[in-house]
Amino acid sequence: MSRSRIIVVTGLATILCATLPLASMLYFSWKRAVSEEQGRLAVYAQRAILRSNISLDEIRSALHALEPLTMQPCSEQHIARMRQLTVNTRSIEEIGYFEHGVLKCTSWGHAEKYAEQTPVDFVTADGMQVSLRMMPAITQGNTMVAFHYHSHNVLTVPSRFADVIVEPGIQLATATDKGYVLGDLNGPDALLIRDVIANPVNSIDDDNLIAIARGPGLIAVALEPRSFLFHRMHRQQLMLLPVGLLIAALMIAVVIWAVRRRLSPLGELSLAVKKREFIVYYQPIIELETGLCIGAEALVRWQRPDGSMVRPDLFIPLAEESGLILPITDQVITHVVADLRATLAAERHLHIAINLSADDIKTGRALASVQAALRNTDIEPQQIWLEATERGFMDVNSARVTLSNARAAGHAVAIDDFGTGYSSLSYLQSLPLDSLKIDKSFIDTIGTDSATSSVTPHIIGMAKTLKLKIVAEGVETQEQADYLRKHEVEFVQGWLYAKAMPATEFIAYYQHNLAQHQGIVATTLPVPPSAPAQWATVSIDDDPPTSG
């Protein structure tokens, strides 16, 4: 993404960061007000359930105390007993005695008027027959709820089932789980109560906030006008608005930090790793004596989404310092297998390898990555050459373990960019190596009066003493090639032969080179006992800008 687009996106993100938290706080203040108010209503509804259970228990106990009848029906003793239970039980207004469905006497005395038992609306689980909204035959008072058990019934006012102290404006109703309303408080809308009981969930409609509570066989509904919410929401807003302002400030700060990080080299590199923006180019490696291409060094390239390339010398050091070189190594491994799998399977004398970073050498993690990538492919382990720069050998013990494991797995091992780091003859003797690559900076001194021009033959002599094959990097002139041939250097790479190229171009180059050198057998390299004596190179670092 270009810097101008990043700036535009940053502006839009800043606006969102400023408005979104405040809008969210308004929304959450409303939701929290609704939730808290419904919680408060649910407490009232739960109290109504408890009060209903108390009333039902009292009614049930009174009826069971009279049944079976142990005294003369409607005697003074019987009527006195019914009167005693009525007076001493808060939930009972009247008790009556029936014979063959006709009222004979009540807790107030003998029945003077003919009255039949009220039709039953439903029967409770324990056998009480319930009649809703009936008119007492004796007192002719308010509408009652009747509970009939065997020969006796009990009358109670409906409000006993919602007898809870509530704030003004709050309405209650208690019903059975079958939808029979036992009682209510403050006159809630009967149709609304019926609908809520049919779908008993906390909700809010255009006019009311609704909360429910459940008990064994009972449902209680609490209602309050929606307008009651605004006062509570205002209090929530006063609490949450400062939080919204703080979150907005933090989000804006994070956006600014993220943009600055995104525009920083490390930030861009991290994002490139996540987006897998790295590709691989291949620079042929040539056998100097015959001109035969025996493999290629794979050079990592960072290709931005717009197609532009970032120079390796700008991001490789940063990747090594930050630890991002490890996932970049993994991406290179993946690309090499994907790019050249078929070619490597068909051309067993062609070889590609992986250049390991210092962290790879220290931990040995990249070896597992290589083995995982080669699994279920036709690529042989000996077709992969592993290179490591001298920086990777600073921890000698770890380096020795990693390189030994690599050779045991069938990979040949090379020391890359030799002469630019920390190596010495004794140092090299202690490590399991197969070849040595002379850095381009020494090849450039060939044929010059440079103070370091005498170093190159010493490096060649050191490699031959250790019986290591030699690869010269960055060969750009015929004079350099002639010098290296004279000193019996086996392999070269550089612009004199070919520049680094994409996989498709390298495959075409290799096939053309192979056709030109039919019948020529390449010089072999010393390799681990488990691997055939054949060779090529891969590196995740790059050749200098003036080289191939």
Image (cartoon, grey):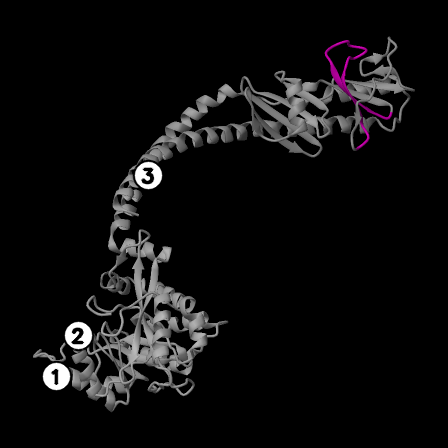
Given residues 245 and 466, the one toward you in this image is 466
Up the image or down, 530 lies above or below 314; here it is below
Which of the two discs, 2 and 3, labels the residue nearer the N terminus? 3
Gap between marks 1 and 2 measured at Cα? 12 Å
Task: Examine the structure image and report whether residue 133 is included in the region drawn in magenta.
Answer: yes
Image disc number at residue 454: 1
Q: State left or right for residue 500 relative to residue 28.
A: left
Q: Earlier in the sequence, mark 1 or mark 2?
A: 2
Q: In this view, does 436 lie above or below 150?
A: below
- What is the three-letter code of the residue carrying label 3? Ala
Callout 2: few (<14), some (14-19), or many (20+) C-alpha neighbours within 10 Å?
some
Earlier-in-chain disc, 1 versus 3: 3
Residue ID at (44%, 22%): 231
Task: Give the residue at mark 2.
Answer: 441
> What residue would you read off at disc 3?
13
**Residue 256 in the image, given as x and y percentages of width and height:** 27, 43
